[in-house]
Each structure stands twice: as C-alpha cells, then as structure tokens.
Amino acid sequence: MDNMEQWKAEIMEGLEVAKIKMLVGFEVAKIKLQEVSVQAQQKIKETPDTQLYTAAAVLVLTILLSLIFRLLKRKKYNTIVLAGLTGSGKTVLFYQLRDGSSHQGTVTSMDPNESTFVLHSETAKQKVKPVHLVDVPGHARLRPKLDEYLTQAAGLVFVVDALEFLPNCRAAAEYLYDILTKASIVKRKIPVLIVCNKTEKVTAHSSEFIRKQLEKEIEKLRASRTGVSDADMTSEYTLGVPGQPFAFTQCQNKVTLAEASALTGDVSQVEVFIREHVKP
C-alpha cells in the first residue's frame, strides 16, 4: 500500500514539474514574440519611405495579378441560344448544325429544343469542344424561357425569315429590342448574330436591307418607349445614343448580321460565329 502511495506521489510530482516547464515555455515564447514585434516595429521606422512604398506597390501588384489570373481562368461557357419569331427557321437551323439535315416536318414546340454536340461540319475533326445549342420557342408566351439560358450563353443567334420579312418586321424588331435591352445581355456583352434565313429563295431580302429596316423599326420603338413612364417600362437598359438615329453599332454588345439557308445547309456563317465564341 505504501508503494502505491509513493507511486502516486511521484506521478503527481512529475505532472507538477511538467506543468511548471510548460508555463515557463509559454512565458519564454511570449517574451520572444514581444522581442520580434519590437524589432519589426523598429525596422519599419528605420526603413526609408521609398522602400516601404515599393513594398506596398509590389504587394498591390501581386494581388492585382492574382485577380487577373482568376478572371482569365473563369469558366468559359459553350451555350449558343437560338431565338426568333415562330416560323423563322430556328429548328431547321438547329438540326442542320447538329445533323447536317433539315428534319423537315418539325412542329412548333412548347419547350426549348436543346442538345450538346460537335457541329456536323466538324465531326471528322478530333478534340473539338462540343456546343450546347438551345432553340427557344418563338411564341410570345414562351419567350420568358429565354432568360433561363442567357446567364450561361456565349452568344445568341437571332433568326429572321428573309422571305417573309416585311410582314413580320415590326414583330421581329420588338423581340430584338427586348433582347438587346436585357441586363443579362448588356452586362455580359453577349454577342448577337442576326441570321437572315431562307436566302435560297430568289425573292428573299438581303441582310443589308433587313439591317436597315430593323434599325428603323427599333428607332421608332426607342422613341415611343422613351415617352412611357418608368413604371410601365419592361426593358432594363436603353438603346442607342440620344439625339442620333439608332444603329446596331451603338449597342454595348457586338451585333452582326449574316445570311443563311438552313433548308439547303448553307450555314457556314453561323458556324463561324459559333466557333468565334465557343473555341474548339
């Protein structure tokens, strides 16, 4: 029993000694830290201002370079959105880009038609980045679905029926106006390609004619909507330059025109646009 008591006493003594050493170690570390802090403050006081400014500039530059690197490394989207009035040929263009076929007999869908694929003209190539193509229904009631895809869009293709353009000019201009004034388009500067489709027909209008007519109609819309009270405005941004006739070149995002014939497979200008913004 005496041995047990003696053993316990030795353990307690050992713990007490360890505790004292630990406390001493903390005190020594604290003193050392205080000495280093004092030395650092003294060093800063002795350092010329020019060196301090240089060090600060290097630090700021390092942070900026890190931010720039992160921006360059941010996710690159591969979504291309097809929009336009019903009957403009969006769905035929969709299948032509995907399969190299017009898929005649397609009907108007109530839901977006989307797929991720390598462009049909590039199927023979290796290591080509697939494109996520979305065909948004053209009916007015279904257009809000467009907003679901714009946040991840690398570009937007607005399809116009070049054959029946004049009867639909006003409606096409209104839809295009709404697109070009969306915050998601303006803030991210999403490029827009206006595709004048069905150019295989002799009576189809040229892209230059369509451009001028759309600009005139959008100018009228801009003038009429400017007079509407802010409470009734549906557009998020204004278009054009005050005091000047509207032109697509005034848009904050890039707007270009192209001609195509989805029915015959002449879609090369659309493919160039896609690959300009979704790198292979």
Image (cartoon, rainbow, N blue to C red):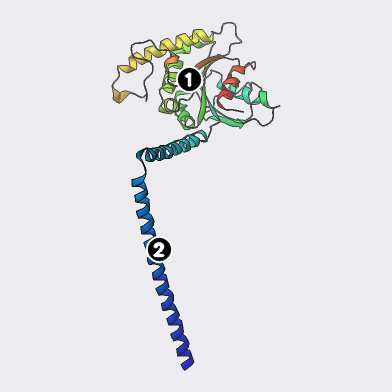
**Are the two marked residues, 1 and 2, in contact with CB atoms closer than 8 angstroms?**
no
- Residue 196 visible at all: no
Residue 272, quarter of picture: top right
- Residue 214 position (above or below residue 49): above
Other-residue count near label 1 (Cα within 10 Å), few / some / many at <14 / 14–19 / ≥20: some
Q: Residue at x 41, y 78 (%)?
A: 16
Given residues 183 and 223, the one toward you in this image is 183
Residue 254 marker: 1
Callout 2 amino acid: Ala
Callout 1 amino acid: Lys
Quadrant of the image containing the C terminus: top right
Q: Mark 2 = which residue?
A: 29
- In the image, is 180 to the left or to the right of 206? left
Residue at the far right: name it. 124
Spot occupied by residue 35 in the image (x, y as percentages of width and height) = 37, 58
- Residue 233 visible at all: yes
- Residue 46 position (above or below residue 113): below
Spot occupied by residue 135 in the image (x, y as percentages of width and height) = 54, 26
Of badges 1 and 2, the one in the foreground is 2
Disc 1 versus disc 2: distance between alpha carbons?
A: 63 Å
Per the image, label 2 sits on a secondary structure element best described as: helix
Q: Residue at x 36, y 58 (%)?
A: 34
Per the image, label 1 sits on a secondary structure element best described as: loop
- In the image, is 27 to the left or to the right of 10? left
Residue at the far top: name it. 203
Q: Residue at x 67, y 32 (%)?
A: 127
